[in-house]
Amino acid sequence: MPPMTLKTRLLTAATALAMAAPVPALAAGFALKEQSVSGQGTSYAGVTAGANGDASAMFFNPATMGLVKGTQVVQTASGLILSSKVESARATRAARLGGTPIAGNASPGDIGQDAVVPAGYIVYSVSDDLKLGLSANGPWGLVTDYGANWIGRYHGIRSDLRTYNFMPSVSYRLHPMLTLGGGIQIQYAKAKLSQATDFAIRAGRTPGSLDVLSDVKGDDWGYGFTVGALVEPMPGTRMGVSYRSSVKHELSGDISFTGLPAPLAGLLPNQGANAKLVTPEIVNIGLYHELTDKWAVMADAQWTNWSRFRELRVVPNNASLTSVTEEHWKDTWFLALGTSYKVTDDLTLRAGAAFDKAAVDVSHRTPRIPEQNRYWLSVGAGYKVTDSLQVDVAYSHIFVPSTTVDLRDNLTGADAGRGNLFVDYKSSIDIIGVQARMSF
């Protein structure tokens, strides 16, 4: 098979895999860091500085394509074993409605789901200085599901967000010590949200006697950009910095209602709906330094502008049915330290640790995204099978402290009529990654 035909087929497979899987949120907010298995081995420390020298680093900094020799294709697959269990839950109506318990399932169990998150990359060297690249990723995602009869259904039942990001990129070495890179984000997003409404409150009936279930579906294409720089002040030492812009989506679709008796069904016809989604800006800074010809140390810091996520607003054609969930998120930092050791010319071992700050505190945490601080420990290895094929593997365990949702309903604001909700969660995450790198 001619080399170019092989590369084309590999890229097609990488792109198809990057489109294939559901994506539970595993980093702060609804971000997905699982874009590089070689980077995962150090908990993503040094990835912005191209610590491992492969094409998967271009997701974090397009300037790192300058480290690639010739043409390279990388395919990753990260298996996510997610446990987020409801330990206890209690829901009551607002005090002015009697404060009575809300009936339903108080033990929905594990609200997350296991998944495989893939990503694909290709870098082509036009010359030693000029590189062209293309990546396919799912950078943002969220899946939580409590079941339609759980006691917190008025605050949310199922939340499902998936994104597919394609980024054509270019890098150019302006000077032996400086490489610049940039890319265009072409992003498709689709979302499904469901929750129940205690319609009896609006109809003047006994609270809880008339639940209406709403399902919203929408999708949209959005566009953004990424820029980065890689500085090499001396052999074996690199610093990388990058900026990933926000992407604005106007998700359009439809909303359907179920649960009203036939004589009242005409009050809530199925109709069009829209919702705004703006992904946050990200700034990355990475360092890589070789202590010896075998040992290297690295670090990364990532700032994410989550404070732009103030509310989740779904607007049907009938604007009086608008649903708003206040979020009040805060900007976050992801901090990582790692090391690698070259056992032989073919085998490299890696390890790293990281802290991932949560974007929301308990006063504004909702059951749709009951996130908490995360603490990473990772190990990994890369083995050169042949001159053209390298395989990388990594394992991470993410420790998540006990998480609490504590929402109060005083019949004012966006949560009016949804009831008081108190939920305790126990969560943990394991990630097993495999990556294949082919060089031509």
Image: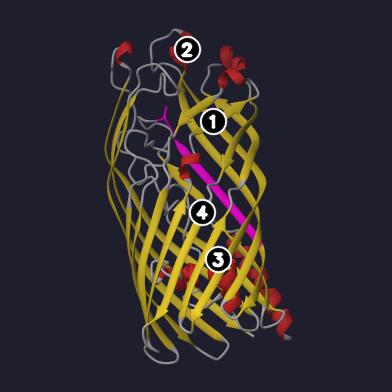
Provide the residue designation for mark 2.
202
x then y, percent, for residue 188: 64, 50
Q: CA distance from mark 4 to mark 3?
A: 11 Å
Residue 107 seen? yes
- Residue 282 is marked as 4
Eye-nearest disc, 2 or 3:
3
Among the two numbered marks 4 and 2 on one chain, the one whose residue lies closer to the N terminus: 2
Q: CA distance from mark 1 to mark 2?
A: 20 Å
Which residues, given as a range, are shown in magenta?
153-167
Label the magenta part by its dominant secondary structure.
Answer: strand
Front-most of residues 85 and 381: 381
Q: Amino acid at mark 4?
A: Ile
Q: Provide the secondary structure element on which disc 3 rests.
A: loop
Marks 4/2 in contact by CB < 8 Å: the verdict is no
- Residue 61 is marked as 3
Left or right of 356? Residue 179 is right
Q: Where is 147 relative to 380, above or below?
A: above
Marks 2/3 in contact by CB < 8 Å: the verdict is no
Q: Amino acid at mark 3?
A: Asn
x then y, percent, for residue 77: 50, 67
Q: Provide the secondary structure element on which disc 2 rests.
A: helix
Eye-nearest disc, 4 or 2:
4
Eye-nearest disc, 1 or 4:
4
Asked if residue 164 lies in the magenta stretch, the reply is yes
